[in-house]
Amino acid sequence: MRINGHQALALVRADLGRDPQDPLEATISLESTGGIVGPTAVDLGRRAAKVARQDGAPLARRQDVRDRLPWNAPAAVGLVFISLLWAHLLIIGGSDLDPSGVLVGLPVGLTLVGYLDRRFVAGDDGPRRLRARLGEVGVTIAVVCLVVGFGPGGQIAVGVILVQVCTTFAARVNVAAPVITVIGVGYAFGTLGDRPMVAAFVSLAVALVIVIFRVLRVPPLMVPPNRFASAVPRAVAGLGLGLLTVPVIQLTTRMGTSPPLIVILPATVAGALAAGFLERMWLVVADLLDQLPVGRRPDRQVGRVYARLVIGGALAGGLATVLLSWAVYANAAPIQGRRGVEALVVMGAIASVSYWAMVLQGVGGERPAAIGLLAAGSLAVLGSNLADRPATAVVLAVVLLHVAWLPLLLLILRDPERVLAAKL
């Protein structure tokens, strides 16, 4: 069956995650992933590029991102903070809480959301593509939860996984505010009443219903999901990041009180601020490229803007981490002491490595980011268990990872034009 230009463009978008730059790129994409060869691929590549030029959606999508950009960082911070409150309900829910549920649920949840987000949501028209594949996404989540549910701390682990899925998709489909409100109300009822565990899981169930209902209202876009091979590195990166946070949980557990969860907040806020620089960077770079005449080679201005925003995001995130950590330490009595300082330092180190992982992922370095995070996370867990020094193990793993990534990061900052050309 012969396909038309719109269908060919859908295949190219599924492969590249964006519109083709020209007919040649569309042709190569169709030949490599669509199984279309010869003159047919050339003709469909030309048609796909023509449809993409006639479609004003890319500029509209960019404007939509620009409109939502000021709210992305506050929404991310709010969702993480509300997740901490939800975890607090689990902690005060009773003495029979199995901490292994959190230790299992956090890495597995980050792995799952990394895979689902990259395969079904990331790129153009993410909510519409999620709507079209909602059944497949639901089955994947159900299978993971079923397997984890029979393990140690199964009920808690499943709850931790679902709250990560809920908050991730809430941000993607623009229902962060109602989800934050629902879980916040559940937290209030849980702390004032005598059944915090019930309040935690009821509020999570309502939040999940809100997200699912919002997705069901989006018109589906029937295109293939992003390639499995591109989603696996993001899942591996999520697993590595989850393993890095396991020693933090061990540190806060040793403090013996629930307020130490607040040690996660400074690095989270700083990470959202730094990520905002990277989001804004791609808008600025795209605007600069639009201003160039067709056929003109991009000058070094594009590279300078890219490097300035990357370095600016790192400096802003680092400064925010230091200032917020000092404010939390000075005003939260339960974390004052050596272990509190260790937990804050560890979270700052994790925030740093997360930022540079996003930089690598943004320019196509998915594999180095994934391999590095997995190696660092495994080293941190191994060192923490063998030496019983979780903070030292995480900091050592993060330092070694920064050293391993340094040549790639220097290449990106020294010659960003080459990196941008490969990305675009």
Image: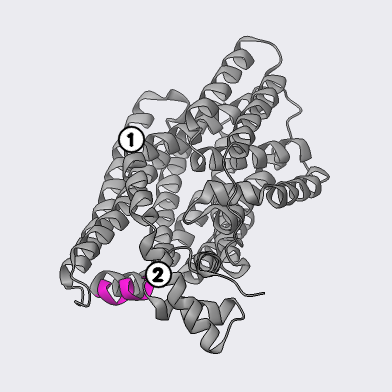
- In the image, what residue type sits under mark 2? Lys
- The percent coordinates of residue 157 (x first, y second) are 71, 41
Is residue 307 visible in this depiction of the protein?
no
**Is residue 353 one of those drawn in magenta?**
no
Q: Quadrant of the N terminus?
A: bottom right
- The percent coordinates of residue 138 (x first, y second) are 71, 46
| For residue 108, above or below residue 73 | below
| For residue 33, above or below residue 91 | below
**Where does label 2 land, which residue?**
50
| Residue name at image x 50 percent, y 67 percent | 9
Query: SS at mark 1?
Result: helix
Judged by depth in the image, the label closer to the viewer, 2 or 1, is 2
Q: Which region is colored magenta?
A: 415-424
Q: Front-most of 395 and 97?
A: 97
Give the quadrant of residue 75: top left
Is residue 312 visible in this depiction of the protein?
yes
- The percent coordinates of residue 176 (x first, y second) are 49, 32
**Where does label 1 land, which residue?**
324
Query: SS at mark 2?
Result: helix
Magenta stretch: dominant SS?
Answer: helix
Q: Front-most of 211 and 345?
A: 211
Counting the numbered discs, the total is 2
